Image: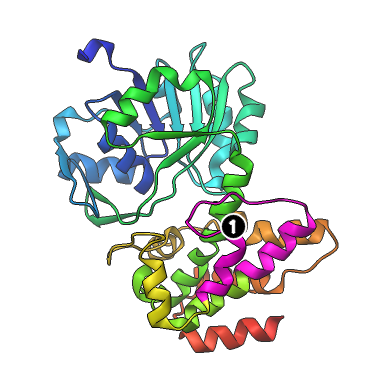
Amino acid sequence: MSESRLPRMAIHGAGLVGCYLGGRLHGHAAVRLICRPYMITVLNEHGLGTSDFRGHQRHVAVDSLDLRTHASAAVDAELVLVTVKSAATAEVAEKLAGVLAPGAVVISFQNGLHNAQQLRAALPAHTVLAGMVPFNVVQTSPGVFHQASSGALMVEDSPALAPFMEAFASAGLPLQPRSDMPAVQWAKLLLNLNNALNALSGLPLREELSQRAWRRCLALAQREALHVLDAAKIRPARLTPLPPGWLPRVLEWPDLLFRRVATTMLAIDPLARSSTWEDLQTGRRTEVDYINGEVVKLAEAHGLRAPVNARLVDLIREAEQQPRHWLGEALLAELRNAC
């Protein structure tokens, strides 16, 4: 495909996930990254590198990058990938409403449940699709973004995806269209309940999940969430070889037995960390309200309590002000006391 015929894509909010997607898609699409100024400084100095746990490695030279800071740069994009934090969605939606070309498609590749709805409300003349990034991305060195766990990109099924499927597939990021995105998003949120725990542990994901005490903390949070979802008559999708309802039980298994099963469920390399950990390291406000906080809100809407997830929200808010690393057994006792 010639350069002039490549689909034009803008990635708004090019941080960890956005830069990784942009680096992989570069050359398979005409990619424009809309970043914060600090990220542009990093990319202008180092270029954009991508790698993954399977051995992929690539570097895009600085002079090949199209870097911008304002939403107006999406004016000629055929596809816009929104990868900002959930708290910034409303602001980004308002800015995009004034610049998007007729027919432009928007995919929300964000954590949380309601970002696509917010974007649709501001962009009624455009196709806005919910998406899900299942894998973890870390910045291993300045300008190098590493996919540290497995999974395929999922997106709400729509005919509007057709012009872009080839670009994603050739970039090694095939899109998996889904007709059940709300169920997919809740299933991802169940897994993301570990984000807060990983941040509080201070450990890489694989090391954290190798310890039974931390897995028991996650089992408490997931079991509580599943109870709330059942009350709300919400059935999360199956994203792993095990049904969602089995996960808390498996997490509590002894370490040796868990390791045998876990290797068939999800590949995680030693570099993986949660986005909540990354936010705490860089002094940014986390997305805990859009993950554990969603369980608390849904519980309240159905006359229930979610004390484990509510306590995790509080502990992350405290960590935003004063970082603290917990031992697994200590946090497990803390969460059990909250029940």
Check disc 1 and give the amino acid type. Ile
Up-down relation of residue 162 to residue 280 (above or below): above
Residue under label 1, please give it: 291
Quadrant in the rendering for residue 299 = bottom right
**Residue 99 rendering spot, x and y as whole percentages:** 50, 18
Q: Which residue is drawn at the image coordinates 52% and 48% (left, top)?
A: 111
- Residue at coordinates 43% horizontally, 19% vertically from top-left? 162
Q: Is residue 317 above or below residue 99?
A: below
Residue 178 point in image, percent of width and height: 54, 35
Is 115 in front, or is 92? 115
Q: Quadrant of residue 81?
A: top left
Element type at mark 1: loop
Q: Is residue 181 visible?
A: yes
Relative horizontal placement of residue 252, taking residue 25 as reference (left or right): right
Please state if 84 lies on the left or on the right of 30 as rendered: right
Q: Which residues are magenta?
A: 222-251
Residue in the image at 50% along x and 47% along y? 85
Residue 47 in percent (x, y) is at 17, 40
Q: Nearer the viewer, residue 60 or 36?
A: 60
Q: Examine the rendered structure and indicate whether residue 134 appears above or below residue 108.
A: below
Relative to residue 28, is residue 188 depicted above or below? below
